Amino acid sequence: MIQNKIIKMLELPSYILRGNILLIGCEEKGVYNPRQSHCEYCPDSQSCRWLKDVDAASDLSQFNYDELVEHFEFAMDKMIVQARMLEHNIFTCTCEMCEWIQDALQLYEKTSTQQ
Ligand SMILES: [Zn+2]
């Protein structure tokens, strides 16, 4: 089932994102807090919010299909930005991150024909 593949695919980006969040000056220690004004203007809060969402459902199968695809899109965006920043060629590079992106793009194509 495609949902299970997406869930499996979210593991690497959530691991990488967690490592990328700048915790310097973060009063919430990287845990998104909607009541905290700091989170409103923090450039990393989008990632924190995503990680919180993904964590909250330790069983990701709680998400419906559309939500899952949304989380997947977010993860792809972040991974591509990361690869570009490190100047990897996402189409030819064979590192873990770029291979993830290549797999993700293929899987994503299937999600758009799924419905
Ligand atoms: Zn690479």
Image (cartoon, helix red, strand yellow):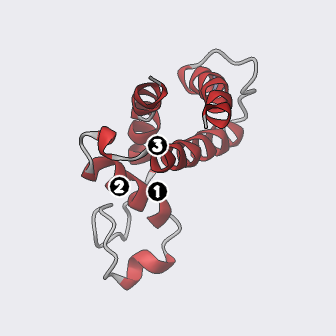
| Residue 28 image-quadrant placement | bottom left
Q: State the image coordinates of residue 11 (x, y, percent, origin top left).
A: 39, 32
Tag nearer the camera, 1 or 3: 3
Q: Residue at x 38, y 46 (%)?
A: 18
Q: Is residue 3 above or below residue 82?
A: above
Disc 2 crowd, CA 10 A, few/some/many (<14, 14-19, 20+): some
Q: Amino acid at mark 1?
A: Ser
Total tally of numbered discs in the picture = 3
* 38 vs 105, nearest the viewer: 105
Judge left or right: residue 1 versus residue 52. right
Disc 3 crowd, CA 10 A, few/some/many (<14, 14-19, 20+): some
User: Is residue 22 visible to us here?
Assistant: no
Q: Which residue is mark 3?
A: 65
Q: Is residue 94 above or below residue 59?
A: above
Question: Alpha-carbon distance for marks 2 and 3?
Answer: 15 Å
Q: Amino acid at mark 3?
A: Tyr
Tag nearer the camera, 1 or 2: 2
Q: Which one is earlier in the sequence, the residue at label 2 or at label 3?
A: 2
Find ligand 1 in the image and state its quadrant: top right
Q: State the image coordinates of residue 75 (x, y, percent, origin top left).
A: 53, 43
Q: Residue at x 67, y 32 (%)?
A: 113
Q: Which residue is mark 2?
A: 53
